[in-house]
């Protein structure tokens, strides 16, 4: 909702972005985001009680950006709930485990679904996590990177354990989202999301011929 | 939005100049119109709206009639569902009544209102609305910018009236009106010159208060709107949850250990919060309930597992809570929040996240099946029909009271066991004590036999005078000093003083004076023990002799102590006996 809520005024206000984390269970979504927000891994001193909803404030090129990072339940049984989670999100991080071929297939499914539901408005990043287990790699670098390029997503090699590649991932995603929101603003605000754009269209058509209720506004 | 702007234009015109044509009925019948009747006169308003209302009421009645058999069919068999069904019916009739009431009140109040175009709406304002109205007014005052406050209050009031006059619109249209109002208000706050200089925080606050105020005021007319099927969905999800009562925490793969009292407490708090959802009016407060519920769930998860909980653990726990709580009017509340909450709040903030999770949980519950629980279809069917109970659900289907009773019984049994143990141990202690006592006495006796011992009399100070004080008369009178001159003559002779019985006192003091070789012997009887030597003085001039200590012969020392000895040995025996 960045372009509707706060993004419209440009520099004056914060840009709020919603980022969803998608991926199979146990690929390290939670560790990834905890490493990013708290810079900790498997640590007793992690101060947050929960790692399912986290905020991160950034300053990119003078723009204040607020990332709301939404973790999603990765279990197969909750797959059908995906659309409720990623509705109106500005960005999605698709995480897979490089030692687990299946989790990469899952990412492909997610990408298809996201593109179908949200179109090109959403910025996608694919993260091959657990690069510290390089020797057990089951998803080749070439395959992953070529796939990412083919669907217009950025690919990153990350390791939540070693803290590698995570800053880059979020920074790049944020920059992408800023670009997207500026684009949509300059294009005369076609509405960043499906829901809002529908509402706007209906508004104009229903409100024009409605003079009967106009006397006491 | 266009409409809003147009309305504003009209308003402005009115404040400067009120044309008579503006006051006339829009129907052009020549009578004066009234904003409360959408600008019609009373007659035209009735014509236009009453017909619409009647049509709506007929439609409603038809709808209700067609729904009723279906609902009853669904309901049969479950006694308490019937209660909720009657509630449902009650509500329907209430709504119908309300509608006709407001209509009547419109008619009743018309004559007074004709002269004052902008009066308060006829409906009584609820306590909640009054409270939030007061807060809102307070806040507007605190902004210290009168024109801006007046403008905001005008916009908000106008909007509320507009909605109240359009209650019969479909819920989607109402939702759009509200959402548009948010957007247009936000735009105005950012652009209009009246609001220039407001910093973003103040704007956020204005938006927040506006939302709170509008929704609290409009709550009765827009929550669970008659044009929606929310009530049916409420009933649907309620029945669904009821038939899923057998689901255990383990089946949802949650780590919740319900037997731990601390966790149980947190779970209860979470359930209370989610049920509370229905009692709030403003979306903010409703969302706050969801957030608070979620916080309790995270607390539960924190106690059950190490490290922060992720969505993988949170969502199943939330589903479990929803299943256990079976919150009232769940769908209505969710729909209400989705339709009328400010989208910025719903889409990015923490509240939005938890609310989304709640939506997910409800959606999951609606679609729950054998596959999503990892059990076989036949098992699932049997559980659903109540034929079988999954292992481990145990007390789950007992009602709260029974559960409590069983818990109490268990506790009582435990208490009884402990009581018995205490009794047994007390008896044992008593026996031990007795044994110890006997043993001790025996030992002491044996030791006494082995080592006979005498208690020697203690030396006690004796006052000899006390002994004799009774018969002082037998004693000789104290001696007076003799004066002896140097020439050898005795100045005064002491006579022998005998006792009354004439017996010569043996203890009489003898004085012998030896002066210059002349042995002067007193004429008194010399005692064998008296030492004349003692009286020998070097100078021999003057000599005094005190009375010697009496009683050396009168009583034997040993005899005097005998009674004492007896008492001492007696006390010794007593001590032994008590030991």
Image: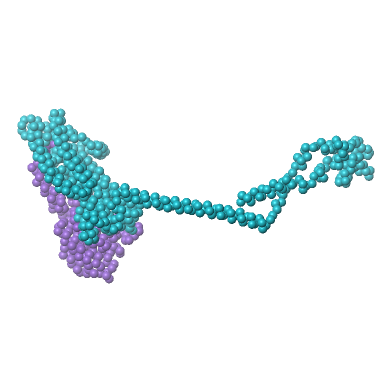
Chain colours: A purple, B cyan
Residue A40 placement, left or right of B364: right
Looking at the image, which residue sits at the far left? B29
Comparing A193 with B164, the one in front is B164
B105 lies above or below B520: above
Q: Position of residue B424 (x, y in %)?
A: 48, 53
Q: Position of residue A50 (x, y in %)?
A: 30, 55
Q: Residue at x 41, y 51 (%)?
A: B415
Name which quarter of the figure residue A114 lies in: bottom left
Q: Quadrant of the N terminus of chain B?
A: top left
Name which quarter of the figure residue A170 lies in: bottom left
Residue B13 placement, left or right of B489: left
A170 lies above or below B104: below
Residue A137 placement, left or right of B170: right
How many numbered dots are placed on residues in this image?
Answer: 0
A126 lies above or below B361: below
Q: Position of residue B240 (x, y in %)?
A: 21, 52
Q: Residue at x 42, y 53 (%)?
A: B417
Comparing B235 with B194, the one in front is B235
Q: Residue at x 69, y 56 (%)?
A: B452
Is residue B86 at least partly visible in the picture? yes
Looking at the image, which residue sits at the far bottom? A135
Name which quarter of the figure residue B36 lies in: top left
Q: Residue at x 27, y 57 (%)?
A: B390
Is residue B262 at least partly visible in the picture? no
Comparing B311 with B439, the one in front is B439
């Amino acid at each position: 909702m960045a372009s509707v809520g706060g993004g419209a005024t440009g520099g004056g206000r914060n840009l709020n972005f919603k980022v969803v984390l998608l991926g199979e269970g146990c690929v390290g979504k939670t560790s990834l985001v905890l490493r990013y927000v708290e810079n900790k891994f498997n640590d007793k001193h992690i101060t947050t009680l929960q790692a399912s909803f986290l905020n991160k404030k950034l300053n990119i090129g003078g723009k204040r950006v607020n990332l709301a990072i939404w973790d999603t339940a990765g279990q197969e049984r909750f797959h059908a709930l995906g659309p409720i989670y990623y509705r109106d999100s500005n960005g999605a991080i698709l995480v897979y485990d490089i030692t687990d071929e299946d989790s990469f297939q899952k990412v492909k499914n997610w990408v298809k679904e996201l593109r179908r539901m949200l179109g090109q408005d959403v910025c996608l990043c694919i993260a091959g996590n657990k690069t510290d287990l390089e020797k057990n790699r089951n998803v080749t670098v070439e395959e992953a990177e070529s796939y990412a390029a083919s669907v217009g997503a950025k690919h990153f090699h990350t390791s939540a354990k070693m803290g590698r590649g995570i800053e880059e991932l979020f920074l790049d995603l944020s920059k992408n989202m800023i670009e997207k929101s500026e684009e949509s603003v300059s294009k005369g605000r076609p509405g960043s999301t499906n829901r809002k754009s529908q509402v706007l269209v209906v508004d104009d058509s229903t409100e024009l011929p409605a003079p009967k209720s106009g006397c006491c506004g | 939005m266009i409409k809003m702007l147009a309305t504003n234009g009209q308003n402005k015109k009115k404040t400067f100049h009120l044309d008579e044509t503006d006051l006339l009925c829009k129907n052009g019948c020549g009578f004066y119109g009234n904003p409360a009747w959408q600008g019609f006169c009373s007659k035209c308003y009735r014509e236009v709206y009453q017909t619409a209302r009647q049509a709506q009421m007929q439609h409603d009645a038809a709808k209700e009639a067609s729904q009723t058999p279906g609902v009853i069919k669904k309901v049969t068999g479950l006694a308490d569902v019937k209660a909720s069904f009657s509630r449902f019916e009650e509500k329907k009739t209430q709504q119908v009544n309300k509608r006709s009431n407001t209509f009547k009140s419109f008619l009743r109040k018309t004559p007074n209102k004709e002269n004052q175009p902008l009066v308060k709406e006829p409906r009584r304002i609820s306590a909640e609305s009054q409270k939030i109205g007061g807060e809102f007014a307070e806040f507007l005052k605190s902004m210290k910018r009168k024109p801006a406050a007046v403008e905001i209050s005008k916009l908000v009031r106008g909007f509320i009236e507009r909605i109240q006059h359009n209650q019969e619109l479909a819920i989607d249209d109402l939702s759009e009106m509200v959402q548009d109002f948010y957007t247009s208000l936000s735009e105005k706050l950012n652009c209009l010159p009246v609001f220039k200089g407001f910093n973003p925080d103040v704007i956020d606050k204005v938006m927040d208060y506006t939302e709170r105020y509008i929704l609290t005021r409009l709550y009765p007319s827009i929550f669970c709107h008659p044009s929606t099927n929310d009530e049916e969905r409420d009933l649907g999800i309620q029945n669904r949850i009821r038939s899923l009562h057998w689901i255990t925490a383990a089946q949802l793969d949650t780590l919740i250990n319900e037997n731990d009292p601390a966790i149980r407490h947190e779970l209860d708090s979470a359930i209370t919060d989610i049920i509370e959802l229905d009692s709030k009016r403003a979306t903010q407060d409703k969302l706050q309930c969801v957030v608070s519920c979620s916080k309790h769930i995270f607390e539960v998860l924190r106690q059950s597992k190490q490290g922060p909980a992720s969505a993988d653990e949170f969502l199943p726990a939330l589903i479990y809570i929803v299943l256990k709580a079976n919150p009232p009017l769940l769908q209505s509340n969710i729909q209400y929040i989705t339709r009328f909450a400010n989208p910025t709040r719903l889409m990015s903030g923490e509240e939005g996240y938890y609310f989304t999770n709640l939506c997910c949980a409800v959606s999951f519950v609606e679609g729950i099946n054998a596959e999503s629980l990892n059990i076989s279809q036949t098992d699932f069917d049997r559980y659903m029909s109540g034929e079988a109970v999954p292992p481990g659900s145990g007390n789950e289907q007992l009602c709260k009271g029974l559960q409590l009773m069983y818990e109490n019984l268990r506790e009582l049994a435990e208490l009884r066991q402990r009581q018995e143990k205490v009794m047994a141990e007390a008896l044992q202690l008593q026996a031990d004590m007795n044994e110890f006592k006997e043993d001790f006495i025996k030992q002491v006796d044996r030791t006494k036999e082995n080592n006979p011992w005498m208690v020697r009399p203690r030396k006690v100070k004796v006052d000899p005078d006390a002994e004799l004080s009774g018969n002082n008369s037998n004693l000789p009178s104290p001696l007076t000093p003799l004066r002896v001159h140097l020439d050898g003559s005795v100045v005064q002779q002491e006579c022998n003083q005998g006792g009354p019985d004439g017996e010569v006192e043996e203890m009489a003091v003898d004085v012998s004076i030896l002066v210059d070789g002349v042995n002067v012997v007193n004429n008194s009887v010399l005692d064998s023990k008296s030492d004349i030597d003692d009286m020998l003085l070097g100078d021999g001039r003057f000599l005094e002799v005190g009375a010697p200590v009496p009683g050396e012969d009168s009583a034997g020392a040993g005899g005097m102590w005998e009674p004492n000895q007896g008492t001492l040995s007696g006390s010794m025996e007593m001590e032994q006996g008590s030991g």
